[in-house]
Amino acid sequence: MADAKMLSVIRERIDSTMALHSAERVLDDAPASIEGKLYYPYHRYIANCMIPTLFGKKDVTIDCLVDAVHGLGATADRMSIDQVRVSAEASLEAMVELEEAESIARRVIAHRLGRRLRMIAPFEIHLEAQGLIHKGFWIAHSDRMRLMIDNTTGGMYPLATRAAVA
Amino acid sequence: MSGTVISFLVLYYVVVLGIGYWAMRRGAGEDLEGYLLGGRQVGPLPTALTLQSTSMSGYMFLGAGGLGFAQGYWALWYAAGDIGGGVLNLSVIGRRMRKLSQIFGALTAIEYLEKRYPSPAIRLFAGILTVFLLGFYVLAQLIAGGKGMALVTGIPYPAALAIAVGIILIYTFMGGYLAVAYTDFFQSLIMLVGVMWIVIAAVSELGGLTAANNAIAELDPTLLSIWGKDLGFQGQWGVVAGALLIFSIGYMGWPHVVTRHMAMTKPATARRAGLWATLWNLFFVPAPYLVGIMAILILPGLDDPEMAIFEVAGKLLPAAVTGLVMAAIMAAIMSTADSLLLQTGSIASRDIYERFINPKASETQMVWVSRGLVFAIAVIGYVVALVEPPTVFGIVIFATSVLGSAFLPAYVCAVWWRKANTPGALASMIAGALVSFVWQYAGLVETTQVHPMLAGVVSSTVTMVIVSLATQKMSPVPPHILDALDASVAVGPIPGRFAEASDLSLANEAAAIEKTLDRGDRHG
């Protein structure tokens, strides 16, 4: 790997064989193949939240990922991180600055807590920036279409086929 | 009500609070975090039951029964529309709205409208109108809560109303009622079993449905007709169509309902939950109307028809069951009021205050704006509910007709019509709200024999089409929105199994990965 670099990557749970099997299953058992893997960047925060309740305050810790390409935030399950060496071309570039990401994370967490706990309250949220992390997506294709598979959750999504499929 | 009823009502709340305490002390670790993250999915059945029970408002328990008591079987027109409304809503706009809102990065249904129809005027008008109308909807819950509390406890209505309003405010402000994660399902089951028990007890009391209908026919045969008491709505298809539409397509225009699409995960899960919800609706939705109809015979001298379901329960059910069922119903009303207040507060703080008044507002400032508005709604609601309480049915029909008329074309065209533009959407919202409002208050229903919902939706739809087409050159839909619309549509012909299994939360990652791949097959 001439232009290889080290990335912090969310631990892979779906390997290429499992990804291929999942792809073929949803493609009505049409033969498919794995083209490769792309790494998508997120700013990761660990949020320590103090939630006021009828029975006193409750301390809760949740993860938040801010999509470093589009600037959209979402809360996330706890995750393990590995250091992985990948070719420079295999990862997408981060476009969102850290300061902006923090503000997005704070907004998303406050919104999420209010909605989920059905309350209007000033939540105390302490954010700990964990830096840029990446998630791997398997790219697969059949003769009819292309799709990507989240290598952590196994979630799938169709891809437009403007990019040539071999 | 007897001491036994009150004892079991108290017992119910003690159990619910106990679950809350347990959740706090023991289960609040990883389970709570999982719940907050939404990462741990419950199955489609609990999801559907919880959603349906928490959306059952004071209308179902008071308005529907009151309508059945007053109009007989004609009331079932409203139930018929409601049965399939949720699935229709999900099918028509659910998946596309989910993808589009994610591409736009919108957190609220009003913010989504502004991103699709870019103009501050859209957000300002939609925000103010929604806050105003949800305020009415909350008023209906306050009245329902107050009336129910008065009947169950025997406390005079003004004091019962104050207690109900107080509980709802505590629920909303202090909240932290961690038990919501655990008790919604429990509450929905008690409510379902209880309401079905009331229907069966009422029908049994009258010797079966046929005997009951024969008895109603002897009393007043027009109550069995599809045209209402004294055939008051005979041939008025415009009114019937409105009654059917309000809870069927009307859902697609309610910001507080369509916002649920924005959190949808897999279409397959949503579809299965939708099917369970329809099954629930099939049994549950007609039940309060039927109880109201049966109450014509069981409680002929009923002073307040809207109390039919409570009174029939008190008369026919064992005292312990009455206490539990009433507690579950009261909890559902409080919970609906709480949800509505949260949405109203959120729209006021994010979509109006932060967007137009103080863009650099801190989260604490926004909390105080929300709380201030919620408190004001509660106080105004208390005064109105005390001085001259309107019927729950009247308030809900007013608020939902205007909401549906104003927003239906805006939400539907947002995902289905590429030419729907900002002037069209704004004009459509204004026309729909205005026509529906004037229709109700100028008494045009009687003179035209057309329901305000029908008049409003036709007006807003026609306005959307005409104004959008007329202003295409002056105000074309921006290219980035057209791109987002293209991206929100399924990518080519994909197998049905794949469409069902797609994880919609990956739409943005997919868009960026597509661009990367288009630039020249890069990956490791």
Image (cartoon, rainbow, N blue to C red):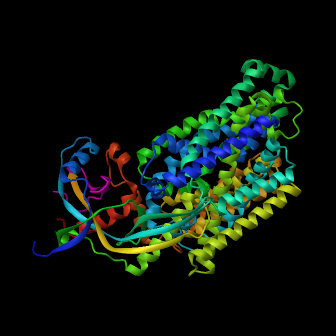
Please say if B358 is above or below B375. Answer: below
Pick the quarter of the image with the C terminus of chain B.
Answer: bottom left
- Residue B458 seen: no
Front residue (pair B204, B11): B11
Location of residue A76 with respect to B369 vertically, above or below: above
Q: Is residue B264 visible?
A: yes
In-image side of B187 versus A34 (left or right): right
Q: What residue sits 31% from the left and 75% below the top?
A: A94
Instruction: Decide which of B185, B399 is in the foreground and name it.
Output: B185
Q: Is residue A164 magenta?
A: yes
The residue most toward the left is: A2
Between B369 and A11, which is closer to the camera in this rendering? A11
Give the image location of residue B473, x and y in percent.
Answer: 51, 73
Does residue B161 sit above or below B125 in this rendering? above
**Residue A109 at x, y percent in the picture:** 49, 67
Q: Residue at the location (42% across, 71% down)? A: B479
Q: Position of residue B29 (x, y in %)?
A: 46, 56
| Front position in the image: B16 or B254 | B16
Q: How many marks?
A: 0
x and y, in percent, of residue B87 in the image: 53, 43
Give the quarter of the image for residue B338: bottom right
Q: Residue at x 62, y 55 (%)?
A: B254
Residue occupying image coordinates x 79% and y 51%: B143
- Chain part drawn in magenta: A142-166
Majority SS type along the magenta span: loop
Image quarter of residue B130: bottom right
Give residue B69's quadrant in the image. top right
> Where's the N terminus of chain B, which quadrant?
top right
Left or right relative to A49: residue B289:
right
Q: Does the magenta segment cover residue B500?
A: no
Vertical position of residue B201 compared to residue B306: above or below:
above
